[in-house]
């Protein structure tokens, strides 16, 4: 029987199989940020251990970083976490892109951008959105702080293999429909626990048609579907993407690497434990209405009615979400007025996302009713590229603020936050209660949808725009 | 991890069931950056009367709750915590175990423990001992009536010896016993396979040399 891409990656990294069915899995790459690493480094020091392989580690501050006036960090707890990362990096002699480095950015944006993420590697980070890296056929998954210490000390993790799921999106996407809409539609279909215990491979014509950036958006939100990892097979786009990346192999090694990367596809006779198929033509621009990423509908429809839900547990969750979001069933999604617009996060802050926003806002103005509209590039290099293309001027002329890279309003750990009751169109990945700030209300959407919402003050169906 | 073979220590009786992790160490301490230093904040809300401490605060001047067991003179220096059912329930925060260990507890005796806490305690060198409720009740009575009440916990022999010379047997899973006796944390266990990891790495370097070049 053939192997899936996941089977191949798993087998290639198996150091040792244990009697209880667990495996000691080798980790090639380790991304470290300020929030989940301090206790891990302290654990190393207390046990008098050194990192097993320092060249496998890349550290970067991102979660606590302010996106303006970034060198004056007012919150003492944030400042302490950032300083601690710098100290740990210095103590152990690791590589870091510090705050003043133009390569600094969100950990999941800089990994691929540098070619630190490569096909066929295992890559971990103390952050659940490490699934992002699967877009390059790397096995990436998030880990807890104890695991961070374990990887630092041993270069391995003790793991149980997950099952194989394939999500196939056939056909061609319609106008204005993006990678974000695909993944929101998938989560809406299978639910936030739909892929629990699985690794998802995304396949089909609509996935192959996406850029690597688009594939990252999809893999990024695998965790919102319950999967720890998401993957896309290697094709010409993968290889083109990596060519000339600063940390990608060169010369002979490049050729050797490419020959291997080409094998990183599921065998034609591989069997998946679960298969989901969507038709690209059926996917419309999506918006979330509730407090879980599965609470999502096409923008052309209305807020759903809990009364129509048969399952009492789900009905209750819907009612609670509507109360929190202050929405009434039957309200057209396009009529919900918004307060803030956030374009950023590891889901949608790459250059392609910013180009999509610029295309929509060019020559328009942010609606007067919008209190704040910010564009936060995913990394310093994305920021430079956008400025080279003049995108920053398009944003600021339209009334957006153009910020410095970081996680920003994705999680309310730095100064960018929603106030209680504020409603935001956000290109991030989680709409949980209080995620973007206590009492804040999040509507997840694609960059194009968030941009159009900024101009109109409410959501509009971008597939209908002229 | 500190090995646990035999431990003799003063017993502090915490006479409540369902002591949850938020009581052991309140949520504001989750933003801290260390694994140590939580001892002064153990049972923060019960121990102090000022409505809660902050990470990094100096606790020496804070108003103490005189009724709380750990504030009583006779229990100063306690290293064995005697408590009731379902100790450590609530969130998965490892900070609870860090706080107990940092305070100086090496052993917690209770009729039952929450699962995740049980694992976290072991990972941090604390031995959780389950005894039936009647035995626990008896130990409480003995502890209340005799100042300076000490127990000897012998993990090798799987017994607890009382000052009266009675040896109470307890059960402990073999894996946990092995880890504690030898002071092995998860990392320590994995490092027993260090040769296998090095062999794998050697092979990998040869087969996929591009993964090991010093990045630009
Ligand atoms: S952008 Fe958001 S989801 Fe991504 S790493 Fe930062 S906080 Fe996590």
Image: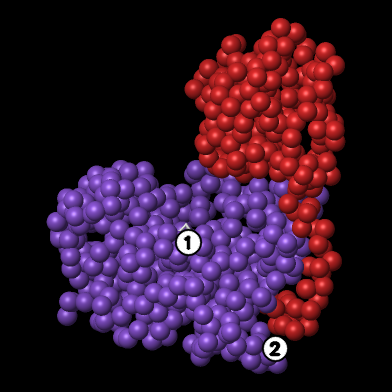
Mark 1 or 2: the one toward you: 1
- The chain to which mark 2 is attached is A
Q: Residues within 10 Å of mark 1 (few under 14, many from 20)?
A: some
- How many circles with numbers are drawn on the protein? 2
Rendered red, the chain in question is: B
Q: Residue at x 40, y 79 (%)?
A: A168
- Residue B19 position in % (x across, y down): 56, 27
Establish if A132 lies above or below A324.
below
Q: Earlier in the sequence, mark 1 or mark 2?
A: 1
Establish if B104 lies above or below A410.
above
Palette colour of chain A: purple
Establish if A1 lies above or below B160.
below
| In the displayed structure image, the side of residue A121 where residue B106 appears, left or right | right
Viewer-closest of A197 and A98: A197
Identify the residue under disc 1.
A196
- The chain to which mark 1 is attached is A
- Residue B174 — which label? none
Quadrant in the picture for the N terminus of chain A: bottom right
Residue A109 can be seen in this image: no
- Residue A253 — which label? 2
Q: Which image quarter: residue A244?
A: bottom right
- Residue A323 position in % (x across, y down): 24, 44
Label 1, label 2: how many angstroms apart (C-alpha)? Answer: 37 Å
Residue A35 can be seen in this image: yes
| In the displayed structure image, the side of residue A222 where residue B75 appears, left or right | right
Viewer-closest of A326 and B37: A326
């Amino acid at each position: 029987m053939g192997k899936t891409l996941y089977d191949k990656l798993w087998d290639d990294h198996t150091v040792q199989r244990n009697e209880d069915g667990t495996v000691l899995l080798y980790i090639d790459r380790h991304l470290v940020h300020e929030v989940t690493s301090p206790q891990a480094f302290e654990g190393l020091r207390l046990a008098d251990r050194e990192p097993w392989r320092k060249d496998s580690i890349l550290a970067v501050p991102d979660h606590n970083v302010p996106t303006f006036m970034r060198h004056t960090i007012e919150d003492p707890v944030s400042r302490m976490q950032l300083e601690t990362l710098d100290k740990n990096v210095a103590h152990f002699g690791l590589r870091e892109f510090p705050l003043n480095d133009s390569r600094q950015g969100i950990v999941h944006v800089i990994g691929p951008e540098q070619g630190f993420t490569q096909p066929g590697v295992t890559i971990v980070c103390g952050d659940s959105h490490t699934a992002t890296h699967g877009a390059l056929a790397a096995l990436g998954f998030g880990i807890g702080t104890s695991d961070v210490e374990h990887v630092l000390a041993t270069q391995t993790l003790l793991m149980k293999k997950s099952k194989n799921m394939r999500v196939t999106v056939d056909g061609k996407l319609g106008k204005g429909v993006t990678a974000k809409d695909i993944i929101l539609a998938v989560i809406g279909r299978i639910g936030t626990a739909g892929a629990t215990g699985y690794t998802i491979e995304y396949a089909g014509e609509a996935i192959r048609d996406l850029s690597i950036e688009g594939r990252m958006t999809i893999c990024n939100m695998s965790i919102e579907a319950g999967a720890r990892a998401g993957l896309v097979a290697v094709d010409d786009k993968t290889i083109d993407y990596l060519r000339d990346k600063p940390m990608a192999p060169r010369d002979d090694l490049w050729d050797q690497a490419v020959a291997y990367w080409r094998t990183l596809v599921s065998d034609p006779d591989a069997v998946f434990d679960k298969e989901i198929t969507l038709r690209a033509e059926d996917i419309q621009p999506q918006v979330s209405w509730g407090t879980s990423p599965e609470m999502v509908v096409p923008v052309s429809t209305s807020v759903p009615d809990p009364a129509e839900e048969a399952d009492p547990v789900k009905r209750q969750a819907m009612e609670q979400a509507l109360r929190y979001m202050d929405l009434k069933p039957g309200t057209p999604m396009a009529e919900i007025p918004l307060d803030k617009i956030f374009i950023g996060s590891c889901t949608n802050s790459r250059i392609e996302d910013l180009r999509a926003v610029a295309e929509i806002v060019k020559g328009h103005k942010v609606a007067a009713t919008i209190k704040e509209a910010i564009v936060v590039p995913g990394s310093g290099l994305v920021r430079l590229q956008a400025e080279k293309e003049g995108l920053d001027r398009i944003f600021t002329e339209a009334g957006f603020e153009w910020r410095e890279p970081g996680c920003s309003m994705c999680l309310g750990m730095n100064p960018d936050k929603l106030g209680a009751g504020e409603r935001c169109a956000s290109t991030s990945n989680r709409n949980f209660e209080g995620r973007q700030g206590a009492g804040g209300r999040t509507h997840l959407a694609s960059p194009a949808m968030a941009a159009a919402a900024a101009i109109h003050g409410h959501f509009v169906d971008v597939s209908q725009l002229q | 991890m500190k090995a646990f073979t035999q431990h003799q220590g003063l017993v502090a009786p915490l006479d409540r069931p369902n002591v949850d992790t938020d009581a052991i160490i309140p949520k504001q301490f989750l933003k801290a950056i260390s694994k140590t230093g939580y001892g002064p904040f153990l049972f923060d809300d019960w121990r102090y009367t000022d409505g809660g401490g902050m990470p990094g605060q100096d606790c020496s001047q804070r108003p103490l709750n005189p009724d709380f067991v750990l504030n009583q003179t006779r229990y100063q220096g306690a290293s064995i915590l005697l408590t009731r059912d379902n100790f450590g329930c609530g969130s998965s925060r490892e900070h609870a175990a860090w706080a107990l260990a940092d305070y100086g507890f090496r052993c917690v005796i209770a009729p039952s423990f929450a699962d995740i806490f049980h694992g976290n305690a072991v990972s941090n060198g604390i031995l959780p001992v389950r005894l039936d409720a009647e035995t626990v009740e008896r130990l409480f009575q003995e502890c209340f009536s005799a100042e300076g009440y000490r127990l000897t916990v012998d993990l090798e022999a799987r017994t607890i010896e009382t000052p009266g010379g009675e040896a109470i047997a307890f059960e402990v899973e073999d894996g946990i016993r092995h880890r504690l006796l030898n002071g092995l944390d998860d990392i320590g266990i994995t490092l027993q396979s260090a040769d296998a990891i090095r062999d794998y790495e050697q092979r990998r370097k040869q087969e996929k040399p591009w993964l090991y070049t010093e990045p630009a």
